Image (tube, grey):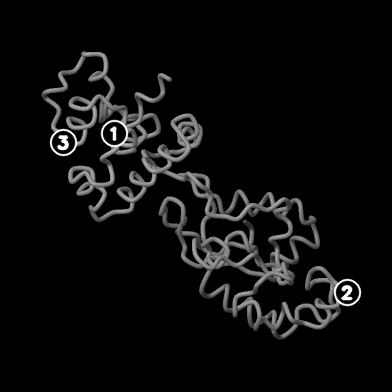
Amino acid sequence: MMQKRYIGCCGAYCRTCKAYRQGVCKGCKLGFDTGERDINKAKCKIKLCCFRDKGFATCADCPDMESCDIIGRWYANNGYKYKKYKQATEFIRKKGYASFIKAAENWTNAYGKLDSARPPTANPASLIAPCGMNCGICYAYLREKNRCPGCRLFNAPEPVSIARCKIKNCQVIQKEEIKYCFECEDFPCKTLKHLDQRYRMKYNMSEIENLEYIKKNGIRKFVRKEKIRWMCPDCGGPLCAHKKKCLSCGRTSEKTYDKNL
């Protein structure tokens, strides 16, 4: 597997690393594995231990990885990327190099998204709440712990925010007389206007305009538009509207409100 040589001992992936692609770095192991570069002149202690002394492809192959002081100190550094490098080696240990490379080929940096933070859903349209909120970009849905299943899964265990939601508990919606708020004769009601104003001010988005788009263009076009609008340019995961960043790779979002998007 030739692509394995592009994986750094610590879990970095050189093929998608900006420094490697721009010619600033020659790669973590490239050249050392063929003898073109002298491994004894390498400054990286991780590489010397893992690749030169033990003959492993990465630290994921080493039975001492969990107790190793060298790689342990590296992963303990401050910075999101060190957490992702550790996640990469743990992923390789669990699922193997082929699965890792398949995921890493879609990255735009030396680290990126592996296991999706989003629970699987057969129909993305089911993540669009009656109010027009896209649950797929909501922090409660994207977070690792105590995930929310989405506003439409009424029978699932519900977080307090959903249980108390006036729109979700609206009698018209509960009776399944309508699917989206724009179908109601009171649209936009006072409750929806209040929610919309808060989201415009805090999160640079509008539920009312989402609903108007769905009414005019249909849910399929809206879902496609949302996927493009909220896709992380680094790893392809969803940008979180509430945290204003990608929870998979840490890329921050500087989105501003634009009704034309």
Q: Relative to residue 155, is residue 109 drawn left or right?
A: left
Q: Is mark 2 on a helix, strand or loop?
A: loop
Which residue matches tag 1? 9
Q: Where is residue 260 in the image (x, y as percent from the top left)?
A: 64, 58
Checking the image for residue 45, the label placed there is 3
Q: Where is residue 55 in the image (x, y as percent from the top left)?
A: 25, 24
Within-10-Å neighbours for mark 1: few <14, some 14–19, many 20+ = many
Looking at the image, the residue that sits furthest to the front is: 63
In depth, the one of 173 and 23 nearer the eye is 173
Q: In which quarter of the image is the C terminus?
A: bottom right
Looking at the image, the residue that sits furthest to the right is: 177
Classify residue 219 by image quadrant. Answer: bottom right
Q: Relative to residue 154, is residue 27 drawn left or right?
A: left
Checking the image for residue 177, the label placed there is 2
In depth, the one of 240 and 24 nearer the eye is 240
Residue shown at the point (45%, 40%) measured from the top left: 94
Tell me the kind of residue under disc 2: Glu
Tell me the kind of residue under disc 1: Cys
In depth, the one of 206 and 25 nearer the eye is 25
Q: Relative to residue 86, is residue 179 drawn left or right?
A: right
Q: What element carries label 3?
A: helix
Tell me the kind of residue under disc 3: Lys
Q: Is mark 1 on a helix, strand or loop?
A: loop
Q: Distance between the residues labelled 1 and 2?
A: 57 Å
Checking the image for residue 128, the label placed there is none
Q: Is the C-beta separation of discs 2 and 3 under 8 Å?
A: no
Q: Is the C-beta separation of discs 1 and 2 under 8 Å?
A: no
